[in-house]
Amino acid sequence: MTRAAAHPVAEIFTQRWSPRAFTDAAISDADLMILFEAARWAPSASNLQPWRLIYCKRGSANHANFLAALNPGNQIWAKNAAALVCFASKTTLTRDGAEVPSPSHHLDAGAAWMALALQATTLGWHTHAMVGFNHEATRKALHVPEGFALNICVAIGKIGDKSTLPEALAAREAPSQRLPMGDIVFPEKMP
């Protein structure tokens, strides 16, 4: 399936998609650091950079604990990813010497996620974000302190053959389309 933008955007936006079938290719520390460097340069409110990225490469000491914290439906395919990353974000900021709620920490972490996803695409890696994970088990497995929200977990890998997936997932293994512009962008006010 091909994807076509309604307006002339950079190809990276239509090339990036979220597969579930991954090969057994390992990711180098150098490639991971490039992905994390891209995330580091994401914009954030007041340049606070509230995101924290906690990762485990497949086969590392804590990988099994991280994988076990994912929902069972995600474990089926995420086990083959070269690395798993949790995006957490600090829920407060310091204003006039006091800790106050940060209204944009999720949005800022989302910008870092998008930067990482696009950088992965440029290097020939694929990413798949997940909200299906046990927050408490993930917090415990990755030693994430209170005061940080767990936003998403991300699988990173080289795209594999969809025949390695259960039939129901294999049927969905294709780049998805997007809603029409008229459904998401409104001049002046929402209808």
Image (cartoon, helix red, strand yellow):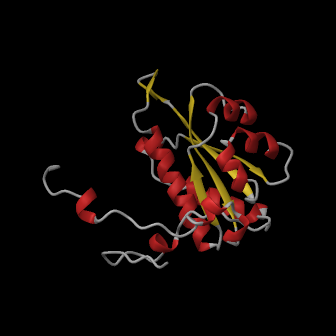
Residue that sits furthest to the front in the current view? 167
Closer to the camera in the image, 47 or 88: 88
Q: Position of residue 68 (x, y in %)?
A: 75, 40
Q: Position of residue 113 (x, y in %)?
A: 54, 53
In the rendered image, the vertical position of residue 82 relative to residue 54, given as above or below: below
Q: Is residue 90 left or right of residue 82?
A: left
Q: Is residue 86 left or right of residue 187?
A: right
Q: Is residue 85 visible?
A: no
In the rendered image, the vertical position of residue 12 relative to residue 84, given as above or below: below
Closer to the camera in the image, 24 or 55: 24
Q: Residue at x 52, y 44 (%)?
A: 49
Q: Residue at x 86, y 44 (%)?
A: 61
Where residue 148 sits, quadrant-wise, is top right
Q: Is residue 187 left or right of residue 92?
A: left
Q: Is residue 49 left or right of residue 141?
A: left
Where residue 19 sits, quadrant-wise, is bottom right
Q: Position of residue 63 (x, y in %)?
A: 80, 46
Residue that sits furthest to the top in the current view? 98
Q: Position of residue 76 (x, y in %)?
A: 72, 52
Q: Residue at x 43, y 26 (%)?
A: 101
Where residue 143 sits, quadrant-wise, is top right
